[in-house]
Amino acid sequence: MKLLYLIADGMGGWPLDELQGKTTIEAADTPNMDELARTGMVGRAQTVPEGMAPGSDVANMALLGFDPATYHTGRGPIEAAAQGLVLDPDDLVWRLNLVTVSKLTIDGYMRDYSSGHIATEVSRPIVEELQKRLGNETYTFVPGIQYRHLLVQKNGANTDDAKLFINPPHDITDKPIKLDLRAYSKSPQLWDLLFEAKEVLEDRNLNSSRANSIWPWGQGRPLILPNFEETFGMRGAVISAVDLIKGLGNASGMSVIDVEGATGLLETNYQGKVDAALDFLKDNDFVFVHLEGPDECGHGGNAAEKAEAISRFDARIVAPLREALKDEDVAWIVTCDHFTPIVERTHTTDAVPFIINGPGLEPSGVKAFTEATAEGTGLKLDKGHELLSFALQCLGMK
């Protein structure tokens, strides 16, 4: 039997007055997920361990079966794994956003964590120039995708910088940056780098985008994960537009499939992801298909767009995969990594709803797939990293 694990990032949410008391899942058109829920097992999983920040890095690590409390070192190291960076054990790897702030002072605000979803062809030359002007024996700027880049601090894991807490910029949209600047100020080198980068970004010959500051955060030592195939007995792949999923795949020895035109936004190459998944499953056992769109719409605070992103996930990912594999021996897990409620515009620690569907399972008796129906079954896994093993056991695959 082959297993498809389908993730709509940030899909979960809370009831909204503007949707007549519905969540965005309830407002979306999801006949395929509803059918899988009616004929399958539905419940909830706590993907974010107590005391850990509800990031996609933590939650997706849990979904892939690895305990974040044991293996998670930071967001930056996961994305470094995606790029295959060769690192020393004591290097400190920061995720580096290009952001828009009202002003880089204690009375400033975070206006945009993505600088208007800056395009890679615009952001990459900027980060390359930052490396040219500011890179040194301590700091190396590493270009990534869109607004997501890296900063490697040589031997930084042995310094107090490793203990600094900087808010993820998507958690503080339209909120003050005062506490973060105070944290940066505890590291004189990092403080200087922040303001030197600001001067570089003010060069309009280099930068015509909305980016006016760098934002290092999510730092940690290089990531080490167990091998996925040795752990779960399946040859697997990840398919995603975002580096953190690719990094988790690389670090656990999975295949990482790049899809041209996969953007991580509402407009993305849905069919390319479907085709890549089907092609991989011809000779392999497991595929983890990740769609970022619902999360990005949640951060944007747009309920209609988030509902549309969920509808597209159902119609353009779940539906064509079901149709293509209707005569095959397959099983399904469908879920999200965390909630991204519209009113919060960031992630929360709510337990996420999931579907497990496959031969021989006793249906939970729900009529549709929503946060409420999942809660109503009474099935909850308090350790989200056990969801994959639980599903394999229920499906007779372990």
Image (cartoon, rainbow, N blue to C red):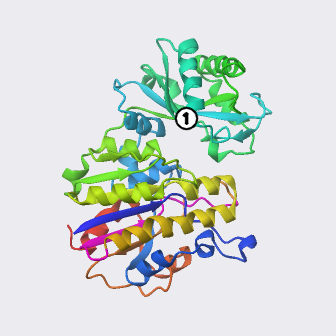
Local SS, label 1 = helix
Pointer 1 local density, CA inside 10 Å: few below 14, some 14–19, many at least 20: some
Q: Where in the figure is residue 74, as x and y percent of width and height?
A: 46, 39
Q: Where in the figure is residue 94, as x and y percent of width and height?
A: 50, 31
Residue displayed at 53% across by 75% down: 30
Instruction: Inspect this view and state whether residue 218 appears.
Output: yes
Q: Magenta segment: does it hold 329? A: yes
Q: How many marks are shown on the rendered structure? A: 1
Asked where in the image residue 273 lies, by quadrant, the reply is: bottom left
Asked where in the image residue 173 lies, by quadrant, the reply is: top right
Q: Which residue is mark 1?
A: 120
In the shown orientation, is residue 278 left or right of residue 178?
A: left
Q: Where in the figure is residue 3, as x and y percent of width and height?
A: 29, 65
Q: Quadrant of the C terminus?
A: bottom left
Amino acid on which disc 1 is placed: Thr
Residue displayed at 44% across by 60% down: 7
In the shown orientation, is residue 174 left or right of residue 131?
A: right
Q: Quadrant of the N terminus?
A: bottom left
**Magenta-highlighted residues:** 326-343
Q: Nearer the viewer, residue 313 or 251?
A: 313
Q: Where in the figure is residue 258, as x and y percent of width and height?
A: 39, 45
Instruction: Inspect this view and state whether residue 63 appears.
Output: no
In the shown orientation, is residue 119 left or right of residue 377?
A: right
Q: Nearer the viewer, residue 44 or 8?
A: 8
Q: Is residue 15 above or below residue 80?
A: below
Residue displayed at 26% across by 68% down: 392
Q: Is residue 258 above or below residue 353?
A: above
In the shown orientation, is residue 107 left or right of residue 48?
A: right
Residue displayed at 50% across by 77% down: 369
Assign the magenta stretch its main secondary structure.
Answer: loop
